Structures are given as structure tokens and as C-alpha cells.
Amino acid sequence: MIILCLSDEVLYNVMNEETTVSLWCKLESLYMTKSLSNKLFMKQLYSLRMKKGTPILHLNVFNRILSDLFALEVKVEEDKTLMLLSSLSSSYDHLTITIMYGKETLELEDALDRCSKTTS
């Protein structure tokens, strides 16, 4: 069943695998390597900045980067919520202040929820 979900480009790399386990191992070795270069590449989270007029896309990119870092077992030591809020464009400064006002702690899910509600 896994093979049915693969694009043609990926399929060409694994078409000789005969078992599900060998297919999975091959896919893992091709796309989930934990090399230093992959880890450094995934650190794009730190330089992520929202482009004007793309709030939903920005939230999707932010979540994808976090998921990729998690999959590579890269620990993000910094506060993800503050990273998200600081990556928003200046037109969202009012939202950032509103979200943070009177709070001692702020959960990432709360910030993502508020950002997505503001954009819809």
C-alpha cells in the first residue's frame, strides 16, 4: 500500500524493493537522513519571515518546518511561540501585543489558533 502513495520520482528509487520493510528502510535512508547538512538546512526556522499577504501559507510553512525538525530529532531549544510571533510581518504587531498582554506563559497552539482566526 505504501507504494501507491509514492510519486513517480520517488518510485523510481525504490522500485526494486520486494518487501514492505525493505521499502520503508530504503525510503528512510533516502529521505530521513540525519546528517549535519540536513539539520542545518532545517534550521531555516530561525530565519523564517512572513511575506506580505500570505498568513495561512506562513503558518503552514512554520508547522512544516517544526514537523521536519521533529522527524529529524532536532531539538528546538528556543520558545516556538515567540519564534512564531517574531516571524510575523509588522502588520501583525497588534495581534502579537494582544496575544501576549497579561500572560506569563503562552502555548504555541494558542498562538497558532489566534493567528489562523485573524487571517480568516
Image (cartoon, helix red, strand yellow):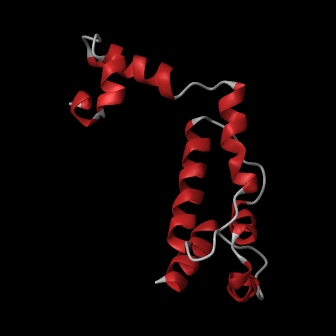
Answer left or right for 14 relative to 109: left
The residue nearer to you, when weighing 9 against 80, is 9
**What residue lies at 20% left-to-right and 30% top-to-bottom?**
1
What is the number of callouts on the image? 0
Residue located at (78% from left, 55% from top): 78
Find residue 77 and report its horizontal and vertical position in percent.
Answer: 77, 49
Q: Nearer the viewer, residue 88 or 109?
A: 88
Up the image or down, 91 lies above or below 23; here it is below
Q: Nearer the viewer, residue 111 or 56?
A: 56
Could you say where residue 14 lies in the image, as x and y percent from the top left?
A: 33, 18
Residue 54 x, y percent position in the rendering: 55, 72
Side (left or right) of 112 relative to 11: right
Image quadrant in which you'd find residue 27:
top left
Front residue (pair 108, 30): 30
Instruction: Say if 42 sits above or below 21 in the image.
Output: below
Q: Residue at x 75, y 55 (%)?
A: 47
